Amino acid sequence: MSKEFIVTPKNIDDEENTYINMTLRMKIKTQKEFDELAKRSKRSRNELMCMALEYALENLKFTTKIEI
């Protein structure tokens, strides 16, 4: 299974969903990387962050014990 997070240019026909506002604290380096990706993909930084969070949730493996 590929671990790549694939981003394509925005499709204007994307469906609208119900949203809420939320505040997020992150490293400046991470914000700059999202800014650059937003420029290249013509998607908003917010949209890309939401896509990344959805991807993380879909591919998350949760465990109660620490694996080393």
Image (cartoon, rainbow, N blue to C red):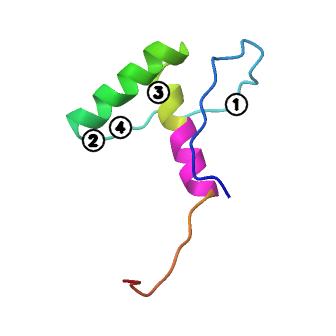
Residue holding disc 1: 17
> First in sequence: mark 2 or mark 1?
1
What is the C-alpha distance between the residues marked 3 and 1?
14 Å
* Numbered disc 1: secondary structure: loop
The kind of residue tagged 3 is: Asn
What is the C-alpha distance between the residues marked 4 and 2?
10 Å
- Comparing 59 with 47, the one in front is 59
Mark 4 in CB contact with mark 3 (< 8 angstroms): no
Residue holding disc 4: 23
Mark 1 in CB contact with mark 4 (< 8 angstroms): no
* Numbered disc 4: secondary structure: loop
Residue 58 is labelled as none
Q: Is the residue 25 above or below the residue 21 in the image?
A: below
Name the front one of labels 4 and 2. Answer: 2
What is the C-alpha distance between the residues marked 2 and 3?
13 Å
Dot 1: few (<14), some (14–19), or many (≥20) neighbours within 10 Å?
Answer: few
Overall secondary structure of the magenta section: helix
Dot 3: few (<14), some (14–19), or many (≥20) neighbours within 10 Å?
Answer: few
- Magenta span covers which residues? 51-58
Provide residue 7's location: percent of width, then percent of height.
Answer: 59, 30
The N terminus: image quadrant: bottom right
Q: Residue at x 44, y 23 (%)?
A: 37
Provide residue 54's location: percent of width, then percent of height.
Answer: 59, 46
Provide residue 21's location: percent of width, then percent of height.
Answer: 46, 33
The kind of residue tagged 1 is: Asn
Residue holding disc 2: 26
> First in sequence: mark 1 or mark 4?
1
Residue holding disc 3: 46
Q: Is the residue 6 above or below the residue 38 in the image?
A: below
